[in-house]
Image: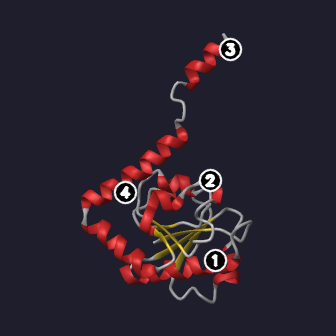
Amino acid sequence: MIWVGTKRCQGLSDEMLSISLKKTIDISVFFGLKLYIRAHQTITEYDIQSLYGDIISVDYIFDNKKPLDEVAQYEGIFSLTTSTADLSIFSYCNPVVCLGLDKVVESRNGIPYKEIIGDLCIHNTQKAIDFLNYLDNNPVSFSAYKNKILNYLDSMCYLNKNFEKEILLYFR
């Protein structure tokens, strides 16, 4: 279980991030998964302990050095905190949850979380667990989930598939 952690910033309070981490820990414990906290390079383990030490009730692995693209390839469930790092996580189509951030997920960084991951973008931990179990036991639904993510990434990255050709023509 990988929590892609961040610090408080515009639109995200310490309380919201604490709720996200607490719910991530609950899911990690439910599934018997090790907790991995992947923080931004500017966030130290001391920062994590200072901000969230009172709610971290399990052993965890901390990292802020490995390239995000490498971490995104890990097998596991990713818990997102609505940062631009989420685009790297999405690109590998692992199961993701966005927990306890209902107030910002509609507009944060222009990424439509609820539209992309549906029932995994929720405040209710049990419903997230139920939907993760559903995806795990239903390959057709998991495939549809992956396709939804890929379609979003494709629409975002390739608004004009002829861009390079058109820009060359323009400058000629």
Instruction: Compare marks 2 and 3 and give the one earlier in the sequence.
Output: 2
Badge 4 crowding class, 10 Å Cα cut-off, few under 14, some 14 to 19, many 20 or more, is: some
Viewer can see residue 77: no
What amino acid type is highlighted by mark number 3? Answer: Phe
Judge whether 165 appears above or below 131 on screen. above
Residue designated by label 3: 171
**Secondary structure at numbered mark 2:** helix
Which quadrant would residue 74 be assigned to in this image? bottom left
Residue designated by label 2: 110
Name the foreground residue: 44 vs 86.
86
- Disc 1 from disc 2: Cα separation: 19 Å
Instruction: Compare marks 1 and 4 and give the one earlier in the sequence.
Output: 1
Badge 2 crowding class, 10 Å Cα cut-off, few under 14, some 14 to 19, many 20 or more, is: few
Question: Image check: 28 left or right of 21?
Answer: left
Quadrant occupied by the C terminus: top right
- Disc 1 from disc 4: Cα separation: 26 Å
Instruction: Compare marks 4 and 3 and give the one earlier in the sequence.
Output: 4
Residue designated by label 4: 145
- Disc 2 from disc 4: Cα separation: 20 Å
What amino acid type is highlighted by mark number 1? Answer: Met
Query: What is the x, y in percent for residue 7?
Result: 69, 70
Callouts 2 and 3 close, C-beta under 8 Å: no
Residue designated by label 1: 16
Instruction: Compare marks 2 and 4 and give the one earlier in the sequence.
Output: 2
Please identify the residue farthest to the top as the structure is shown: 172
Look at 47% across and 57% down and name the residue there: 116
